[in-house]
Amino acid sequence: MPISIIIGAQWGDEGKGRVVDWLASAADVVARYAGGDNAGHTVALDGEVYKLHLLPSGVLHEQVVSVMGNGMVINPVNLVREIKALRAMGIEISPQNLIISSRAHIITPAHIALDAAKESALGDAKIGTTLRGIGPAYLDKCGRAGIRTGDMLLDVEVFAERLISGIAVANDSLQKQGIEPLDARAAAESYLKAADFLRGFIQDASIFLHQALKAGARVVCEGAQGTLLDIDHGSYPFVTSSSPTAGGALTGLGMGPMQVDRVLGVAKAFSTRVGGGPMPTELEGELADRLRGSGENFWDEFGTTTGRPRRCGWLDGVLLRYACMVNGFSELMLTKLDILSGFEQLKLATAYEIDGLRSEHPPVTNEELERATAIYETMSGWSEDISGCRRFAQLPAAAQNYVQRVAELCEVPINTVSVGPERSQLVQR
Ligand code: GDP
Ligand code: IMO
Ligand code: MG
């Protein structure tokens, strides 16, 4: 397996971090290709819980080199904090096992302030972003006005000047909205300190990956966010500003498609979403509360990055099938199957009714998706605790049927399901 791509098949938080951590044990390189610290990837190992926002989820494996790709947007100050926090937990992170692409873009305090200003101007129509400056950073990238990680290798004065002039442009627009301008010099100072710390990690990551592949390395590409948050394929404008889908892995790392031999979609056994936008299978009340959990457990449905309660609902087979289509998954993995234990009946959306018409594909506009009524198949649930199962045959028949039905509906095999957050809690065929 030279290149495996791991992709969220829903609205993010599918459990990509734990899947990447699992696959990393047989990998040489784990490379993240999109997004920034809007992501929150949880890895649970031997009772310790690691929450990663920027660092790839392979960092816990000694033999793995982690790569942060050109498709990412990186807040250098937050990255330094994350590296230091992991080091304090005993995880080794050095330029020997972490490579930051010189072509990734930098999130500045201006981007963060503009993200907040835009959300507040949108009022009730807000996207519900993570307020990490993601949209404005990608906007500068596409508008050819961004600052890149490679710029941290320049003369310190030149880097500081770029930051300060970027903040000055943002200040103009903030002041027009009646928002206090940022202190550009103070911001530049903290970024210069971060640049000092990070300089040794920065190199051309595509060249590194190319050479690693030539030497026979096995590369796992880690997606952030999810297919339905993709700037092209998601429920626009309630999306993020990057390409979490399969194509994004190649542009976000600077690799060709010919060595990719596995595209693994990760889907939760039910649906969750944080932030605004349509969600046809959303539940309210007791059922939603049961899926969400009370918040006592780290795996309950509260955002890893923002702590917001996630919206919960039945599995949306229409959107999942669509995710399989736009990514070309070679297989699908279902996570959090254990959370469905104890439901007498389970529902699986297999089609929508929109304005009296049946559709098996999602509509293009959010207005139509808001009007879509899910058409459900009802299946029997199971009451057993399945968290100790490790082989498919050990799962109750109703759980096997549920997994089988999802695979059939999506026309993609499901060979692995997870039944708990720990590295070992996987059920394989
Ligand atoms: P990611 O962003 O896709 O990496 O997912 P998150 O880490 O944001 O959210 C997934 C949550 O579910 C985390 O708290 C995981 O520890 C947890 N999790 C993953 N797989 C399972 C599972 O099979 N069962 C349970 N109970 N929790 C899981
Ligand atoms: P991981 O990698 C879930 C959502 C936000 C918001 C929209 C835009 O942990 O799966 P942004 O800050 O990116 O401009 O917000 O996207 N969002 C996520 N939801 N998981 C994520 O990442 C997300 N990253 C962004 O809630 O609706
Ligand atoms: Mg997450």
Image: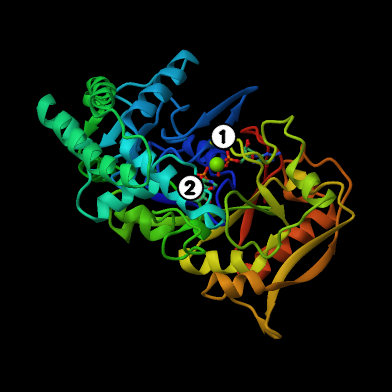
Q: x, y percentage for residue 407?
A: 66, 64
What residue is disc 1 on?
42
Q: Residue at the location (83% across, 64% down)?
A: 379
Say whether residue 104 is visible: no
Tell me the element at label 2.
helix
Q: Residue at the location (78% across, 61% down)?
A: 401
| Callout 2: CB less than 8 Å from ligand 2 | no
Q: Amino acid at mark 2?
A: Ser
Render colour scheme: rainbow
**Labels 2 and 1: the sequence-earlier one:** 1
What residue is disc 2 on?
120
Q: Relative to 147, does residue 197 appear above or below in the rendering?
A: above
Q: CA distance from mark 2 to mark 1?
A: 29 Å
Q: Relative to 370, does residue 426 appear above or below in the rendering?
A: above
| Callout 1: CB less than 8 Å from ligand 1 | yes
Ligand 3 shows up in which quadrant of the image?
top right
Q: Relative to 54, does residue 2 appear above or below in the rendering?
A: below
Image check: 375 left or right of 428? right
Q: Residue at the location (32% across, 30% down)?
A: 76
Q: Which mark is residue 129?
A: none
Q: Nearer the viewer, residue 9 or 403?
A: 9
